[in-house]
């Protein structure tokens, strides 16, 4: 029944998004009001999912936010690009591997052999991440150390997440469909700035095309970076907040901490042995700061075996 509620919310959101297609021919100020009305309606749809099903609400909210992001991209591009055909519009809205329509044509089309190899590599990573994760979750490491439990579970989760993303994009491209790579070797990122260029590349491209450049990222990259991470933090507050029915503050805090680190390292390009040190430092920083993110995730379901520490809102 919960799956049905999620499906109804997402299908209704897609149907509502279709109402924006005729608005693409309107002037910008008129189009903006149509976008605002549709965005509010779509972002409220996850409330159709029962409040007890927090993870299901979270997924529905993420999907609805993604749909609104695509509408914003179309709205932003409508001032200088021709209106896409209805078929292109529908295909874009249904494509889970891109948030920026005008860049979709630039995405690579790997050979089927490359996609099959990626599928196998992704499956191996997913199995390893999930297998280790099962052992770690059963071990209840929180009884020994919160930090140890967090690091062990987060490493397993990221391995499984990367593997799952590899599987998904490989299968999508094997069907002959275009899409942007979700992730790219973020484990080897030498700086936080490089990490966010490699992790969640759909969102990175969306923010770069629709916000960073528009707010003067070329002239004031530090300020633009902080604004972008602030917006991302608020978006995550919405996704988590609508699921747990409260504002937590942890997602915004996480993205602002990361934003400061990205702004501080955006021009840093370590090479040689220094790069290895920077990679290790970036991994440690991400593991430490991600406590803020997973504290929010813990409210959707039991991620940690024991209660959160007091400094994270625990008892």
Image (cartoon, rainbow, N blue to C red):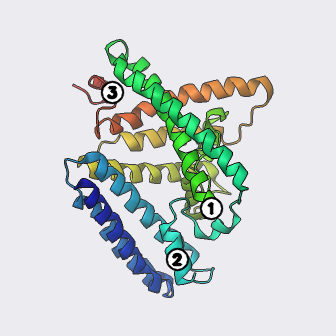
User: Of discs 3 and 1, which sits in the foreground?
Assistant: 3
Which residue shows up at 51% across the image and 33% down it? 127
- Per the model, the C-alpha gap separating discs 2 and 1 is 24 Å
Say few, some or many: other residues with alpha carbon within 10 Å of mark 2 (under 14 / 14 to 19 / 20 or more).
Answer: many
Q: Can you identify the residue that label 3 sits on?
A: 304
Disc 3 element: loop
**Residue found at the far top of this picture:** 144
Asked whether the viewer can see residue 212, the reply is: no
What is the x, y in percent for residue 78? 56, 79
Disc 1 element: loop
Q: Are the residues at dot 3 and dot 2 in contact (C-beta closer than 8 Å)?
A: no
Instruction: State the mark number for residue 213.
Output: 1
- Per the model, the C-alpha gap separating discs 3 and 1 is 39 Å
What is the x, y in percent for residue 218? 68, 57
What is the x, y in percent for residue 93? 48, 70
- Per the model, the C-alpha gap separating discs 3 and 2 is 42 Å
Which residue shows up at 48% across the image and 68% down it? 94
253 versus 1 height, above or below: above
Along the line of sight, the residue nearer the viewer: 120 or 65: 120
Asked whether the viewer can see residue 137, the reply is: yes
Left or right: residue 218 versus residue 84 is right
Say few, some or many: other residues with alpha carbon within 10 Å of mark 3 (under 14 / 14 to 19 / 20 or more).
Answer: many
Left or right: residue 162 versus residue 143 is right
Say few, some or many: other residues with alpha carbon within 10 Å of mark 1 (under 14 / 14 to 19 / 20 or more).
Answer: some
What is the x, y in percent for residue 184? 64, 44
User: Of discs 2 and 1, which sits in the foreground?
Assistant: 2
Left or right: residue 259 versus residue 30 is right
Q: What is the quadrant of residue 180 in the picture?
A: bottom right
Q: Can you identify the residue that label 2 sits on?
A: 89
């Amino acid at each position: 029944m919960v799956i049905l509620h999620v499906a109804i919310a997402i299908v209704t959101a897609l149907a509502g998004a279709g109402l924006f297609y005729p608005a693409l021919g309107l002037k910008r100020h008129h189009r903006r009001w149509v976008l605002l009305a549709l965005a509010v309606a779509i972002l409220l749809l996850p409330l159709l999912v029962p409040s007890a099903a927090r993870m299901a609400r979270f997924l529905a909210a993420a999907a609805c936010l993604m749909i609104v992001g695509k509408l914003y991209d179309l709205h932003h591009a409508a001032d200088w690009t021709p209106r896409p055909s209805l078929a292109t519009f529908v295909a874009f809205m249904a494509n889970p591997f891109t948030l920026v329509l005008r860049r979709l044509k630039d995405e690579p089309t790997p050979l089927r052999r490359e996609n099959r190899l990626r599928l196998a590599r992704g499956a191996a990573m997913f199995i390893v991440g999930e297998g280790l994760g099962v052992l770690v979750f059963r071990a209840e490491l929180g009884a020994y150390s919160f930090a140890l439990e967090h690091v062990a579970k987060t490493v397993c989760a990221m391995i499984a997440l990367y593997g799952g993303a590899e599987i998904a994009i490989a299968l999508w491209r094997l069907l002959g469909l275009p899409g942007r790579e979700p992730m790219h070797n973020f484990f080897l990122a030498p700086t936080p700035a490089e990490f966010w260029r490699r992790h969640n590349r759909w969102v990175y491209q969306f923010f770069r095309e629709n916000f960073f450049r528009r707010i003067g990222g070329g002239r004031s990259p530090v300020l633009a970076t902080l604004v972008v991470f602030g917006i991302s933090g608020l978006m995550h507050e919405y996704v988590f907040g609508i699921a747990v029915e409260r504002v937590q503050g942890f997602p915004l805090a996480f993205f602002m901490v990361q934003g400061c680190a990205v702004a501080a390292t955006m021009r840093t390009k370590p090479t040689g042995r220094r790069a290895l040190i920077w990679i290790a430092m970036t991994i440690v920083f991400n593991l430490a700061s991600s406590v803020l993110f997973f504290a929010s995730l813990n409210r959707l379901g039991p991620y940690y075996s024991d209660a959160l520490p007091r400094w994270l809102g625990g008892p």
